[in-house]
Image (cartoon, grey):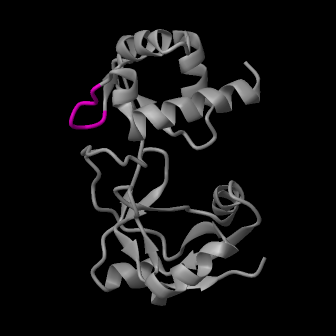
Amino acid sequence: MNQAQQTRISKFLSLHLRHRPELLGLVLDAEGWVGVEALLTACSRRGFPLTRPQLEEVVGSNDKQRFAFDASGTRIRAQQGHSVPVELGLVVQTPPPELYHGTVAAALPAIWQHGLRKMQRHHVHLSPDEETARRVGSRRGQPVLLAVHAAAMQADGMTFYQSGNGVWLTEQVPPQYLRELPS
């Protein structure tokens, strides 16, 4: 499968496993899981045929590891980024001293005024390194990188979680914990 096909499938899965499972007639359980066979059947019904080997390739090769199978391999879910109610069972963790967020210049006025907000998602997503944040920011244009003073946030009582794919999550990042990195 080529990169364009993988991207197309990944975007399709993101829409339905993070935001709109009902469009496929799926119901996620409380932790965001859905049966693999139910997903594959629903994809076919929707005119988006997907095989188990294709699904495994997308899950295994996705650079952000957006999706995960359960231990039995019979269920799948998005690792984070949901706008539908799910409980991912995340445990509070100590973040590294600094984390990163990629965005675009057009978003900076709101960020400097309000900080990073989760919007329709459950958490603000932060990257463990500059390169990942740069890739995230470049999805919408020329990236702007922000450093997040995670240690200071935690010292001030804010909590952090880390998803199964290494993305750091928090409720919000007030502007005083942010600084723009040179491009």
Q: Is residue 1 above or below residue 164?
A: above
Give, as a single range, the part of the protein colored magenta: 27-32
Residue at the image position 28 percent from the left and 61 percent from the top: 92
Tell me if 19 is positioned left or right of 167 in this view: left
Is most of the magenta stretch helix, strand or loop?
loop
Residue 60 or residue 116, whichever sits in front: 116
Picture quarter containing residue 55? top right
Magenta segment includes 29: yes
Q: Residue at x 40, y 41 (%)?
A: 19
Locate the N terminus by quadrant. top right
140 in relation to 117, above or below = above
Quarter of the image where the C terminus is located = bottom right
- Using the rendered view, name the quadrant where residue 169 is placed: bottom left
Q: Position of residue 42 (x, y in %)?
A: 41, 14
Circle count: 0
Residue at horizontal 47 percent and vertical 74 percent from the top: 116
User: Relative to the observer, which residue lies in front, 46 or 128?
Assistant: 46
Residue 80 image point, x, y percent:
41, 47
Picture quadrant where residue 131 is located:
bottom right
Where's residue 159, x and y in %? 30, 70
Q: Residue furthest left?
A: 30
- In reply to whether residue 127 is colored magenta, the answer given is no
Percent from the top left, x then y, of residue 51? 55, 9
Compared to 136, does 52 lie above or below? Answer: above
Residue at the spot x=67%, y=27% of the render? 6
* Residue 20 shows in this picture: yes
Q: Is residue 60 visible?
A: no
Q: Nearer the viewer, residue 92 or 136?
A: 136
